[in-house]
Image: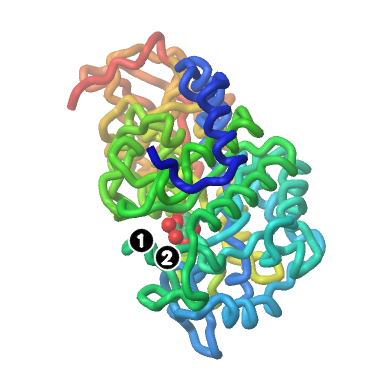
């Protein structure tokens, strides 16, 4: 059998994977323990930041668009990497200590983790890499990954690396191998004649090795992304890549984007095209992008990632900011369906944040300060649907998120249980009157909602919730 071209270290890593106790031997209990903090966290901050951030959605003085991902600007304007770098590098000027503002804001908002782009599709690495000169070390004489990791740790946040396996810079990345994956020069012959993808993969693995070796414990590897016609071992030597990461970071949690197959939870190329199954060999969680699965994804771990406006990377032209109400209710909706919310910020080229970004995360933080216990460590709602809002569960306690405050002051909760105690998180010392009726528990509420976006009731039950079918 002819072995695919791979480096000696690569081959050794595959053999080591076969020999050492790895994922294959992980029991369900061990897996639960590994994922526990992430399942409890429920809320994280996503950061898209790189060379594109300085360009801010503008190319040659013109807006490239007002909607959509401007971290794709190089591809949108079909720039070769030299032209792109020449324009973007002078505009990428991180101020000292920029990352502290991100981390403090994440903390203040109640995020438990922060995932940031160590490299996006443009190929520019934010760390100080020994295997590339298209990196912050070479260009800025700084290690931005270290700066961001340190800032997160100072705030007690867990840290994740988003890493693009797609690469629009590397001169051995064979973009013609995939029809579905984008590239700025798609359809054009390679400027350097021929390419050997195996060489790109050696480089990809070497950079990832640096990232998982040099920054202490990293909690998440967030891969991006694959296509049906280009994925897994063929495209990225994915098995080997994941085992490299695990060998350095045994507790790490990874998403499923090194693949795009049914076993890995994918149905199609669309960002809504997922299947509610995930073989752990292909990752730990599924990543619905820009939307919330209608009924959650029972039995699988999932995380909705979403932008604050419509772009991941900063654009000066995108003003379609989501309201505080939308963001807070999204977080609740996702928790009620058993998922995590990874909410994105797109800092500017100097690392600073727009006022809208700060305001949004502060508003979530103000809500979380009072109501955070109704998000962290909760599990999905026992109810299929509630007219007035959402619910989550923590053992025998339910948290009821009331979006539509009842005009008559009574809230019907379709449960056959008895309530042992009911309080508003906004007024935890005042007990709410509860009566049992054939339709369920009837709660007597104050005339005015404590929070117009979502007021939360903590309802303690006499046992596991027994839902009355509608
Ligand atoms: C996408 C995009 C990208 C963004 C991301 C976040 O697939 O390519 O720009 O980083 O996913 O989910």
Mark 2 packing: few (<14 Cα in 10 Å), some, or many (20+)?
many
Occupied quadrant, residue 398: top left
In this figure, which residue is indicated by the disc labeled 1? 178
Residue depicted at 47% across the width and 35% down the height: 456
In this figure, which residue is indicated by the disc labeled 2? 175
Task: Please state if 239 lies on the left or on the right of 385 as rendered.
Answer: right
Q: Secondary structure under badge 2?
A: helix
The N terminus, quarter of image: top left
Toward the viewer: 41 or 183? 183
- Percent across and percent down for residue 365 are 61, 46
**In the image, the residue with mark 2 has its CB under 8 Å from the nearest atom of ligand 1:** no
Occupied quadrant, residue 381: top left
- Percent across and percent down for residue 297 are 33, 35
Mark 1 packing: few (<14 Cα in 10 Å), some, or many (20+)?
some
Residue depicted at 62% across the width and 53% down the height: 362
The C terminus, quarter of image: top left
């Amino acid at each position: 059998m002819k072995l695919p071209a791979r480096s000696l270290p690569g081959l050794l890593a595959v053999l080591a994977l076969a020999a050492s106790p790895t994922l294959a031997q992980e029991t369900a209990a061990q897996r639960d323990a590994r994922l526990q903090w992430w399942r409890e966290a429920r809320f994280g901050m996503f950061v898209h930041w790189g060379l594109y951030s300085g360009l801010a959605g503008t190319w040659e003085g013109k807006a490239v668009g007002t909607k959509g991902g401007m971290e794709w600007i190089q591809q949108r304007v079909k720039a070769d990497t030299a032209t792109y770098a020449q324009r973007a590098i002078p505009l990428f000027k991180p101020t000292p200590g920029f990352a502290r503002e991100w981390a403090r804001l994440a903390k203040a908002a109640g995020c438990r983790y922060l995932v940031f782009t160590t490299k996006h599709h443009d190929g520019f690495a934010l760390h100080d890499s020994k295997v590339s000169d298209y990196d912050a070390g070479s260009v800025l004489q700084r290690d931005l990954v270290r700066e961001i990791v340190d800032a997160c740790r100072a705030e007690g946040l867990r840290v994740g690396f988003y890493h693009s396996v797609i690469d629009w810079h590397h001169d051995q990345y064979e973009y013609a191998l995939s029809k579905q994956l984008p590239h700025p020069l798609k359809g054009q012959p390679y400027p350097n004649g021929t390419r050997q993808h195996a060489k790109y993969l050696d480089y990809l693995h070497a950079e990832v090795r640096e990232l998982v070796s040099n920054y202490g414990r990293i909690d998440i590897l967030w891969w991006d992304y694959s296509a049906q016609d280009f994925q897994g071992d063929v495209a990225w030597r994915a098995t080997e890549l994941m085992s490299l990461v695990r060998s350095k970071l045994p507790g790490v949690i990874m998403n499923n984007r090194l693949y795009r197959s049914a076993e890995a939870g994918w149905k199609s190329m669309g960002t809504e095209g997922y299947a509610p199954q995930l073989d752990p060999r292909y990752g730990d969680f599924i990543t619905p992008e820009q939307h919330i699965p209608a009924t959650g994804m029972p039995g699988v771990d999932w995380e909705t990632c979403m932008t604050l406006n419509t772009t991941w990377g900063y654009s000066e032209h995108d003003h379609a900011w989501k309201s505080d109400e939308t963001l807070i209710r999204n977080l609740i909706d996702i928790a009620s369906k058993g998922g995590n919310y990874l909410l994105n910020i797109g800092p500017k080229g100097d690392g600073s944040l727009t006022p809208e970004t700060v305001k949004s995360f502060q508003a979530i933080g103000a809500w979380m300060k009072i109501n955070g216990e109704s998000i962290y460590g909760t599990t999905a709602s026992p109810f299929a649907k509630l007219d007035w809002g959402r619910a989550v569960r923590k053992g025998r306690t339910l948290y009821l998120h009331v979006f539509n405050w009842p005009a008559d002051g009574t809230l019907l909760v379709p449960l056959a249980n008895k309530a042992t105690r009911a309080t508003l998180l906004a007024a935890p010392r005042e007990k709410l009157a509860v009566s049992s009726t054939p339709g369920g528990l009837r709660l007597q509420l104050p005339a005015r909602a404590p929070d117009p976006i979502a007021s939360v009731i903590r309802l303690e039950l006499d046992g596991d919730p027994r839902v009355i079918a509608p």
